[in-house]
Image: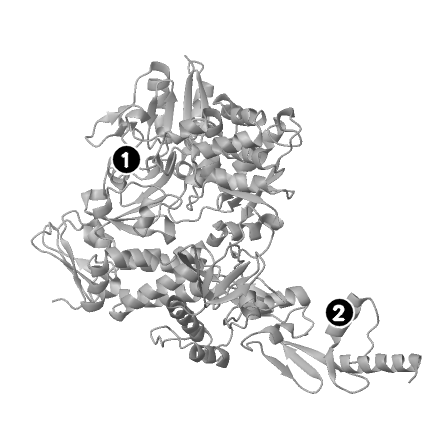
């Protein structure tokens, strides 16, 4: 089927998410909580767009909105600009230390709202990507805690987690770099817990934490080889070269 | 003739001591061979403020505020001799004692369908339910095809009583249309609106009607498993529903072969942990699955992908309680009640500053005036009516000029309020509408799940602005900001909680804007509620020197000689308003902080 986005015809499958269709057609829609690896969050609400279906206009959240009927989509209508501007300013007051949010406010020309109460500090926008990434890729060491305006992301009881392997998936997926990771030569500290880093036995690059490597080896069902991905590729290349000769 | 003594043992009456009353009846009746009676502990009669309620059948005599000491007299006079104990009868508006519930102005205009058995049967006794025609609908439904059941539901025009008003027949039919198994049937008993207790009352007082409704639904859609999600605070509801499920299984109404038909249905209770947002359908399902109770985007409906991504019908308690009636009497008969687009009856929890508070079931389309004045008896102490807040925390406030609006799913929405699940809080001229809006926003900011930005952050900012206005720091531009923030929350929040959270603010801004302006411009709370903006004093002309204010004042600010005009020391006064409530002469006056 075909829909139009900002006047441009776009081919799509029935049921496909609107954000994906826009991305494929080079139409930019801002988003914080969307990540291809962990879909379906739909919580930052930055990606709102206006759809008009048979003359009926509606604000929808494009990352989780499946296109079922032919419609016209406007990613930058007056209503979208106004409401997105308010959402951006709400996020800015929550995460005043985030340069990413400040940049988005400027890029999308969000009107200043000085009346809103600003948090003292912080970068987290509560998108929940870290929680989902940890649950799906790692061990589920962090979770949302409390509800309502008091909601936050934390380890159980704010104590160092007994299951965290220090893989840092949470920090690397965070759109506002809100999760603090401290690294020295041999250690990584994240969520208040210290991990010993393991280095590649061939080139000396950091592979990961001891616990993370043990977990990966257990899941894969084989011994860890102590190599970084680069050196592993080189070793495999050597094996191939030895087998097939020049 | 053997008398039937029904002692109300709903939560309200239990709190007023009805268990002791029931035990006293049982003890004395057991000792006296001349008393021939059966004592039955029933569910809630809905008139809780006048409890404990005792009804004697077949005489049709209802007593109110019955204490243990009244029991011997009731046995002697009414049960043995058929006489009434006049002091325990309800007095109507003219002060005349009324004998039966049918003559009581609170009950007379009501039409009970969802509440049909409550107060009449013992919820712990399945035979009581069967004796009133219970499980007839299930028997009938077993002989019908799923399509015939769905046709009957469509014909009834029943719409979801949880508030959204989605046509029940359509919901069931959609779920029936998916060939994905297993399917689930679920009951939403997570009633959380402040002041609302209709679902609680039904679950406690007539659990089998809900179970039977779920069983009919399961037959129609092809489900073999179901859940009743009940908030854990409703201990009696959880207990009665669990007992009812066991009893229904023992009698073969549930289990591996419903009434010998070979059709299966297993039901179980899931206790809610107390989060308001878990009343939202998708959050409820997350919670049933054991996950954090957060809603998901509803572009794909639960009837398609609900519990464990399987087709699920989730109905509200009251909706389900209507189902057996519809199957037995036919959809057409049910559709004869109510309005063009809202069929049947609706149960309201009528509370607040109204003379008669309680659970009220009336045909859809009854006006607010009928509910508040005819059934509720008007505003307490005959003070002026100011507003009625309908639809729970995310409903709206409706002013006096709209008292003649019919209450149904669609009308109130046009005016920025909603019928919702049926909460109805009446407010008089001593209610500050800004404070009311602030209260609800505060409630919701604690109860929002916190997942999406507009709801979580929007409520936080809204609360800060409203608190500023209530405390004299408001600015006129705040009103426009509240409106545009409200619009954003309505459009872009994830679930119905966030989408409707601005309603109390937007509706009060629409109908009581001058009250906001008085707070901001004049630093004055017209209702005399906002402490930071209100000074209390005594009008010496009206003060009779009765000392009522002196007795209730918590800080010793009110003082004076008896029969002499009293005074309030502004240094000690904390503006709590207790003196004003206590004064019978209207001598306590309020002024704004800035007023002379």
Mark yes or no: residue B236 visible.
Answer: no
- Residue at screen point 64% across, 26% down: B261
- Residue at screen point 40% across, 31% down: B335
Q: Secondary structure at mark 1?
A: helix
Residue denoted by label 1:
B375
- Is residue A160 shown left or right of residue B440? right
- Residue at screen point 52% across, 36% down: B240
Q: Quadrant of residue B269?
A: top right
Q: Establish if A120 lies above or below A38.
A: below
Instruction: Characterize the local packing of mark 1: few (<14), some (14-19) or many (20 or more) Cα atoms within 10 angstroms.
Output: many
Q: How many marks?
A: 2
Residue denoted by label 2:
A215
- Is residue A77 shown left or right of residue A65? left
CA separation in Å, label 2 and label 1: 67 Å
Which of the image's four quarters has the N terminus of chain B? top left
Which of the image's four quarters has the C terminus of chain B? bottom left
Mark yes or no: residue A202 visible.
Answer: yes
- In the image, B190 versus B304, the foreground residue is B304
């Amino acid at each position: 089927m075909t829909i139009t986005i900002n006047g441009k015809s776009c081919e799509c499958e029935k049921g496909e998410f609107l954000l994906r269709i826009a991305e494929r057609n080079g139409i930019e829609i801002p988003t914080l909580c969307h990540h291809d690896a962990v879909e379906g969050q739909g919580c930052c609400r930055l990606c709102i767009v206006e759809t008009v279906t048979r003359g009926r206009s509606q604000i929808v959240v494009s990352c989780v909105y499946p296109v079922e009927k032919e419609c016209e989509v406007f990613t930058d209508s007056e209503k979208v600009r106004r409401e997105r501007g308010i959402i951006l300013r709400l996020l800015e007051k929550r995460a005043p230390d985030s340069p990413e949010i400040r940049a988005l406010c400027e890029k999308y020309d969000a009107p200043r709202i000085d009346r809103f109460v600003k948090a003292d500090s912080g970068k987290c926008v509560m998108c929940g990507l870290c929680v989902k990434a940890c649950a799906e890729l790692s061990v589920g060491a962090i979770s949302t805690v409390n509800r309502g305006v008091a909601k936050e992301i934390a380890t159980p009881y704010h104590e160092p987690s007994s299951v965290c392997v220090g893989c840092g998936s949470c920090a690397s997926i965070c759109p506002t770099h809100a999760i603090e990771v401290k690294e020295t030569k041999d250690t990584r500290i994240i969520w208040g817990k210290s991990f010993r880093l393991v280095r590649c036995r061939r080139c000396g690059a950091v592979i990961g934490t001891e616990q993370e490597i043990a977990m990966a080896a257990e899941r894969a069902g084989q011994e860890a080889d102590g190599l970084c991905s680069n050196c592993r590729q080189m070793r495999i290349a050597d094996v191939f070269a030895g087998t097939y000769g020049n | 003739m053997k008398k039937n003594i029904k002692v109300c043992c709903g939560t309200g009456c239990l709190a007023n001591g009805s268990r002791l009353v029931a035990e006293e009846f049982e003890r004395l009746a057991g000792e006296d061979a001349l008393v021939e009676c059966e004592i039955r502990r029933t569910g809630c009669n809905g008139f809780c403020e006048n409890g404990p309620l005792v009804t004697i059948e077949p005489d049709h005599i209802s007593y109110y505020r019955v204490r243990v000491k009244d029991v011997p007299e009731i046995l002697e006079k009414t049960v043995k001799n058929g006489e009434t104990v006049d002091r325990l009868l309800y007095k109507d508006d003219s002060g005349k004692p009324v004998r039966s519930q049918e003559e009581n102005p609170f009950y007379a205009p009501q039409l009970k369908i969802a509440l049909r058995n409550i107060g009449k049967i013992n919820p712990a006794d399945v035979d009581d339910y069967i004796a009133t025609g219970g499980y007839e609908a299930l028997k009938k439904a077993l002989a019908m095809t799923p399509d015939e059941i769905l046709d009957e539901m469509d014909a009834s025009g029943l719409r979801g009583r949880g508030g959204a008003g989605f046509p029940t027949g359509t919901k069931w039919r959609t779920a029936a249309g998916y060939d994905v198994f297993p399917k689930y049937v679920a009951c939403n008993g997570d009633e959380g609106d402040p002041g609302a207790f209709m679902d609680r009352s039904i679950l406690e007082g007539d659990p089998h009607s809900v179970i039977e409704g779920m069983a009919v639904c399961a037959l129609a859609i092809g489900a073999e498993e179901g859940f009743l999600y009940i908030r854990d605070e409703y201990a009696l509801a959880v207990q009665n529903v669990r007992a009812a499920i066991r009893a229904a299984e023992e009698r073969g109404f549930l289990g591996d072969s419903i009434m010998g038909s070979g059709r299966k249905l297993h039901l179980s209770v899931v206790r809610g942990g107390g989060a308001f947002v878990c009343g939202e359908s998708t959050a409820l399902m997350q919670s049933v699955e054991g996950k954090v109770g957060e809603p998901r985007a509803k572009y794909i409906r639960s009837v398609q992908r609900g519990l464990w991504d399987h087709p699920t019908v989730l109905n509200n308690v009251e909706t389900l309680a209507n189902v057996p009636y519809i199957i037995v009497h036919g959809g057409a008969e049910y559709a004869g009640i109510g309005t063009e687009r809202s069929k049947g009856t609706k149960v309201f929890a009528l509370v607040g500053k109204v003379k008669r508070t309680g659970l009220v079931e009336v045909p859809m389309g009854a006006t607010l005036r009928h509910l508040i004045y005819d059934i509720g008896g008007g505003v307490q102490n005959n003070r002026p009516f100011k507003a009625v807040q309908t639809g729970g925390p995310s409903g709206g406030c409706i002013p006096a000029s709209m008292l003649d609006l019919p209450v149904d799913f669609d009308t109130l929405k046009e005016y920025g309020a909603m019928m919702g699940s049926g909460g109805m809080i009446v407010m008089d001229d001593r209610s500050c509408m800004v404070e009311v809006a602030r209260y609800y926003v505060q409630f919701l900011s604690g109860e929002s799940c916190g997942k999406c930005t507009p709801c979580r952050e929007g409520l936080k900012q809204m609360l800060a602005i409203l608190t500023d206005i209530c405390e004299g720091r408001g600015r006129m531009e705040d009103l426009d900001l509240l409106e545009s923030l409200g619009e954003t929350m309505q459009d872009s929040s994830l679930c119905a909680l966030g989408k409707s959270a601005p309603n109390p603010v937007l509706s009060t801004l629409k109908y009581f804007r001058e009250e906001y302006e008085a707070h901001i411009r004049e630093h004055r709370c017209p209702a005399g509620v906002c402490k930071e903006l209100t000074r209390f004093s005594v009008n010496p002309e009206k003060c009779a020197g009765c000392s009522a204010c002196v007795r209730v004042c918590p800080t010793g600010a009110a003082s004076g000689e008896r029969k002499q005009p009293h005074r309030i020391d502004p240094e000690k006064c904390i503006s709590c308003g207790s003196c004003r409530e206590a004064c019978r002469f209207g001598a306590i006056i309020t002024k704004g902080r800035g007023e002379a």
